[in-house]
Each structure stands twice: as structure tokens, then as C-alpha cells.
Image (tube, rainbow, N blue to C red):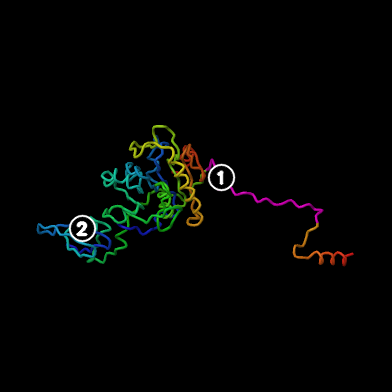
Amino acid sequence: MPQWTPTKTWEGRDVFIIGGGLSLKTFDWDLLKDECTIGCNDAYLLGKEVCKICVFGDPKWYRKHKHELVKYEGIVFTNHGNFQRNRTDWIWALPRKARGLAKDALAWNKNTGSVAVNLALILGAKRVFLLGFDMCLLNKHEQNWHENLLNEPDKSVYPLFIRGFEMLSKQMHKYFSNAEIINVTDSSALNMFPKVACDAFWKGRVK
Amino acid sequence: MGLYKMLPKTGPHEEPDGQGNVVTYAAGDVIENDSDLSTRFPGKFIRIDTGQSAGKDMQPKIPIPHRFIREPAPVLVTQVAPESVQPVPKIPEVDSNDVPVDRFSTPEEVADETEAAE
């Protein structure tokens, strides 16, 4: 698997992270076509026009999706150790750091969203906008905007994800002091970043 | 026809040799091939007969979307993160009748200074 040499291809830009939350179920994906985007896991299903880069960190997810993922025309990144030694030559890898943030690795923090944020910051993002980062179960039976359930809905995972983001936010000043993270997810339980209401954000976004 | 070198930490790689055989190559091997192996297997092969650089070929082509913003549009934040609110330092109130105490003077020195002043 090829190792990526980090470059600031998106320096100074706004980068949108596509999370997996149910709040994106009715989202107008066309809004993202002209934006720099990094999608977590199943976001590759939206195609490269919407999801320019796909990241994953969970080998279980990869095993389930590899036959479809290989058809995706965007760029695929991971930070999982297993993938850094195998022969898959269309997945780009960076080393995995367990917690926080890094400039030459992708921190895991026990969730793929965090990996995507770290990648956006390495690429030079000035502002990172989080979409679909619900961090809670908005519906007892559904947890994602897509229908490819990897695990049964389980609300006990969200505190782990939130703790991961706490570790990430504590290292923002150390590694990426000029960047900011803004949560554009209605009803999100992720409260350590400034929030903007989704409708208001897109109405105010200059085309 | 091009000449390709298999990059470190890649392989093994199986490739037809054009004579009906399949040959297994390892990292560091040089292969002559009709097809463009550096495009077919990016990150695995570099073309070495055209001066192509390995670093350049090994990087993904990250697209730069067309959106152009002269000034980043301001965002109206509807909820400020608790961590971003800086605590206001508590400045102790000072009673104007209190006489400042010099912490570095001994009681004897203070008494001497008081007597001298009188």
C-alpha cells in the first residue's frame, strides 16, 4: 500500500467532513459538489463528485465494503496498521496515532470522523465543518443516513466518540493553531466545537 | 515499451511476460512491459526510462474543487463551545484602608521604619 507524503493541497480552504449521522438523511448532497470534502466510511457511495476523499479506519468495515469501494473513483485513505503492509495499491496510508492530532500521522481517537478531521487539517484546511456528527441516536432503530448497518444501533458508543474528540480538540492549539472546527449538525451531542444551525449555514454560504 | 522498477515494500507482483508465461516479481525488480505499469499500479511501479520521479508518481491526485472564495464567508455561530469561553480571572478586592505589607521585611525592620517615620 502506498504511503502518502502529506501536502497542503487544500491550504486555506473550507473542508467539509461527511459523517454518518441520521441527520444527513434528507441532506441535499449537491451542496457539496463544489466543496472540498472528506467522507467517512459509507460516504464513498455518494460518488467522487460529492465525496472527494473517503477515509476508513475499521478493518471490519473494509471487509464488508471492499468490492464496492474498489469501484469508487475518489481517493481512499486509511490509518489502520493492517493496511499499511498489504498489497492493496489504491488505498493511501498514513501511520496511526492513538489519540489527539498529528501532522505526519492520522490520529484514531476511536472514530473515523476524527481521522477525517486530522486529514483535513494536514491538507491545510482553514475551517473544518462537521456534517452528520450526531453523536447520539436520533431514532432508536436508525443511526445512519445510509442503510448499510455495520453494527446494531448502540447509544453506548457515542460517549467514546465524544471523548475521542475531546482528546483531538485539546491538541488543536499545539498542531493546527490557525484552523478551526465548526459543527454544522443539528441536534448534535458533540459540544466542544462552536455550532451553527444547518439551514442557516447553507443559506448564508456564498455561492 | 517501457522500463519499470518495482518500488520498495511492494509486491510480490504477477505479470505476464508476453510469451505466455506469468512471472512473479519482487520489490526492486526491473520489468520491461508494453503497458504503462506506473498508471496501472500507481505506488507499485515507476517508469525509469523517462526520468519520472518516484515521489511525484507515488502521490494521490487530490482534486481542488472549483469553488473560489475571496474572503472566507463569516459563519454565524449559534452556540459557543464551553471550552472556547475563557474564564474571567478573579481579581481580589483591595480595601483602601489596608496598608500594603512588604513580604520581604522582617517584623523588626518594619518596626524600625515606623519609628523612623515618627
- Amino acid of disc 1: Pro
Please provide percent x and percent y for residue A202: 46, 40
Residue A39 lies in the magenta-colored region? no
Mark 2 neighbour density, 10 Å: few (under 14) some (14–19) many (20 or more): some
From the image, tell me which residue sits under label 1.
B82
Question: Quadrant of the image for the N terminus of chain A?
Answer: bottom left
The quarter of the picture where residue B115 lies is bottom right
Question: Who is closer to the viewer here, A30 or B118?
Answer: B118
Please provide percent x and percent y for residue B97: 82, 53
Q: Is residue B28 above or below residue A118?
A: below
Horizontal arrangement in the rendering, residue B50 relative to residue A188 (left or right): left
Question: Who is closer to the viewer here, A28 or B81?
Answer: B81
**Dot 2 lies on which element?**
strand
Residue B84 lies in the magenta-colored region? yes
**Residue for point 45% across, 44% down:** A160
Horizontal arrangement in the rendering, residue B32 relative to residue A2 (left or right): left
- Amino acid of disc 2: His
Please provide percent x and percent y for residue B41: 24, 56
From the image, tell me which residue sits under label 2.
B13
Mark on residue B111?
Answer: none
Please provide percent x and percent y for residue A199: 47, 37
Which chain contains the residue that carries disc 2?
B
Task: Report how far apart the C-alphas of labels 2 and 1 lie in the structure.
Answer: 54 Å
Magenta segment: B76-98
The residue furthest left is: B19
- Taken as a whole, is the magenta stretch helix, strand or loop? loop
Q: Is residue A12 above or below residue B47?
A: above
In this view of the protein, can residue A55 be seen by the observer? no
Sequence-wise, which precedes: disc 2 or disc 1?
A: 2
Q: Is residue B54 above or below residue A195?
A: below
